[in-house]
Image: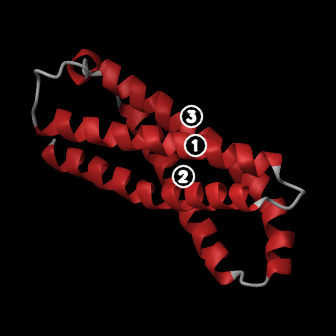
Amino acid sequence: MGWAIHLHLIAAVSWIGGSVFLFVLGITLRDKQDQKEVYPRIGPIYGFFEITALFILLISGVFMITNNGLMDILFDSSISNQVIDALRIKLSFVAVLAIMTVVHTIIALKTLRIEKTPLQKFFSRGASMGIFLLNFVVLHYAMVIRDIL
C-alpha cells in the first residue's frame, strides 16, 4: 500500500491546492476583462491537471480499498464500524464531487472561447463552488479515517 497512499496524498494535495488557488484567483480578479484574459489561458491547463489528479485519486483509492479487502465490506450494510462508516461517507462525497467535476468540465470546454449563457454560468459556478467546498469535507473524512487508524 506504500506507493498508493503516497500517490493518493500527492494527488489530493494537488487537487485541493489547485482548487484553492482558482478560488482565490476568482475572488481577486474582479475586472471582467482580466477574467476573460486569464481563465481561457489557465483553465484548460488546470482542467487537464485536475482530471489527471482525479483519476489518480480514484485509481489509488480503489486500489487501497481492494488491497485491504474492504470492497465487499463497503457494500455490506450489516457491517458497521467507525472506519467503514467514515469511508462510506467519504466515498459518497467523492461521488458527488466527481459528478460536479464532470458538469463543470463539460461546460468549461464547451464555452472556452464563447460567452456562457446564464444557465451555463449558474451550473458552472455552482459546480465550481461545490467542488471547492466538498474538497474540505472529503479531506475532513480522510483525516477522520486516519485518526481512527
Compare residues 41 and 133 and report the one nearer the observer.
Answer: 133
User: Whole-Å distance between the Cαs marked 1 and 3?
Assistant: 5 Å
Labels 1 and 2: the sequence-earlier one: 2
Q: Which residue is mark 1?
A: 53
Residue 48 in view (yes/no): no
Q: Amino acid at mark 1?
A: Ala
Q: Is residue 141 above or below residue 116?
A: above
Q: Residue at x 39, y 59 (%)?
A: 136
Tag 2: Cα neighbours inside 10 Å, few (<14), some, or many (≥20)?
A: many
- Give the x, y percent position of residue 134: 42, 55
Tag 3: Cα neighbours inside 10 Å, few (<14), some, or many (≥20)?
A: some
User: Whole-Å distance between the Cαs marked 1 and 2?
Assistant: 6 Å
Q: Amino acid at mark 2?
A: Trp
Q: Which residue is mark 3?
A: 55
* Helix, strand or loop for disc 3: helix
Q: Amino acid at mark 3?
A: Phe
- Horizontally, residue 144 falls left or right of residue 52, namely left
- Quadrant location of the N terminus? top left
Report which quarter residue 145 is drawn in: top left
Report which quarter residue 73 is drawn in: top left
Q: Which mark is residue 122?
A: none
Q: Which residue is mark 2?
A: 15
User: Whole-Å distance between the Cαs marked 3 and 2?
Assistant: 11 Å
Labels 1 and 2 touching (C-beta < 8 A): yes
